[in-house]
Image (spheres, rainbow, N blue to C red):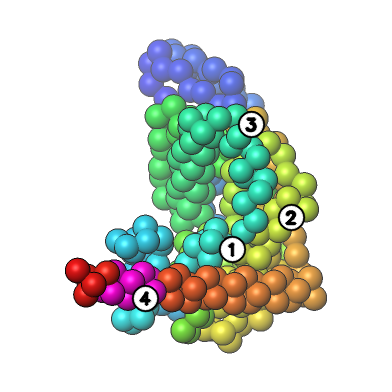
């Protein structure tokens, strides 16, 4: 592990080991502690095979550009597509007007790439797979993931699945980051990157999202998901954790069903509008 003239970095400390150096018993003990610490970093979380998860296919719809899932030949809208289509856009519009369209797009793309990179680090850690990303985005995302692991994973006793595809038959589908036993409760976990700290009242859609996943999991696997946890980290390594349980979780399931109804009403209206436009075009052609 250590070679002549090699530097070993651990949390900002540089240790130079020379092959001529004689290690004391204390040094040997410290060395073994360091090795154990490194091994634990790549061991991952304890895996339970309680649930046998079904895999679907994630597809980008060529007509709408929205994400859909194919489960056994049935295409279903994603949870994030439904929430995006039915959310109040007023705040987002004000923000875009304030910073400008170009800057808003730059921030959105950067946040998306950083979030994807952070998720990759977390997924690799959960599964005990060695992974690194030395790109500038990766170098930002890695300490964020490490902060989530340090603060958030200490309450995770075992996990059932990572990046789990879920669907509620005939209604919707999606992918959740983690299904696990968290503080003795079966839990849906979602990881989020944020540019700034969040207040609970700002992230209602996050709660609705995990409630939708919990609802689908219970329907498919006859589970009793009692808790959902949102783990958030900012680029300056500010960690936040938000939990909803039992009755509070059920209330967000009801909110999700209302949003799902809104989505289908919007889709119905769009189809009706398309049919009207087609008929109008046919009428014009017949008039010529």
Instruction: Give the residue drawn at x 51%, y 33%.
Output: 101
Instruction: Please state, as top left, top right, bottom left or bottom right, where the C terminus lies in the image.
Output: bottom left
Mark found first going from the N terminus, 1 or 4: 1
Q: Earlier in the sequence, mark 2 or mark 1?
A: 1
Q: Position of residue 240 (x, y in %)?
A: 72, 46
Q: Is residue 75 left or right of residue 32?
A: left
The N terminus - image quarter: top left
Q: What is the secondary structure assignment of the residue under circle 1?
A: helix
Image side of residue 197 versus residue 176, left or right = right
Q: Nearer the viewer, residue 281 or 213?
A: 281
Q: Check disc 3 and report the residue beneath it.
A: 98
Provide the residue designation for mark 2.
242
Rendering quarter of residue 19: top left
- Marks 2 & 3, CB-CB < 8 Å contact: no
Q: What distance separates the C-alpha of mark 2 from that of mark 3?
A: 29 Å
First reached walking from the N terminus: tag 4 or tag 3: 3
198 or 151, which is in the foreground?
Answer: 198
Q: Which residues are magenta?
A: 274-283
Residue extending furthest front? 288
Mark 1 neighbour class, 10 Å CA radius: few under 14, some 14 to 19, many 20 or more: some
Q: Which mark is residue 275?
A: 4
């Amino acid at each position: 592990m250590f070679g002549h003239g090699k530097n070993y970095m651990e949390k900002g400390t540089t240790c130079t080991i020379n092959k001529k150096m004689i290690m004391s018993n204390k040094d040997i003990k410290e060395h073994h502690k360091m090795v154990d610490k490194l091994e634990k970093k790549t061991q991952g979380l304890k895996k339970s095979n309680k649930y046998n998860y079904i895999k679907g296919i994630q597809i980008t719809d060529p007509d709408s550009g929205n994400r859909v899932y194919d489960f056994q030949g049935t295409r279903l809208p994603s949870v994030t597509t439904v929430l995006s289509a039915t959310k109040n856009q007023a705040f987002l519009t004000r923000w875009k007007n304030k910073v400008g369209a170009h800057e808003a797009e730059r921030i959105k793309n950067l946040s998306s790439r950083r979030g994807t990179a952070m998720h990759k680090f977390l997924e690799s850690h959960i599964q005990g797979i060695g992974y690194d990303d030395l790109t500038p985005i990766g170098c930002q995302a890695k300490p964020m993931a490490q902060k989530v692991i340090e603060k958030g994973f200490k309450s995770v006793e075992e996990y059932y699945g990572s990046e789990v595809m879920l669907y509620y038959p005939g209604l919707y589908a999606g992918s959740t980051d983690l299904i696990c036993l968290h503080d003795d409760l079966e839990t849906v976990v979602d990881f989020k990157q944020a540019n700034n700290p969040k207040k609970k009242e700002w992230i209602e859609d996050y709660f609705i999202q995990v409630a939708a996943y919990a609802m689908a999991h219970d329907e498919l696997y006859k589970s009793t998901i009692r808790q959902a946890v949102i783990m958030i980290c900012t680029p300056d390594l500010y960690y936040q954790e938000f939990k909803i349980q039992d009755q509070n979780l059920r209330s967000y399931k009801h909110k999700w069903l209302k949003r799902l109804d809104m989505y289908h009403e919007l889709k119905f209206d769009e189809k009706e509008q398309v049919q009207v436009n087609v008929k109008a075009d046919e009428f014009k052609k017949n008039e010529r």
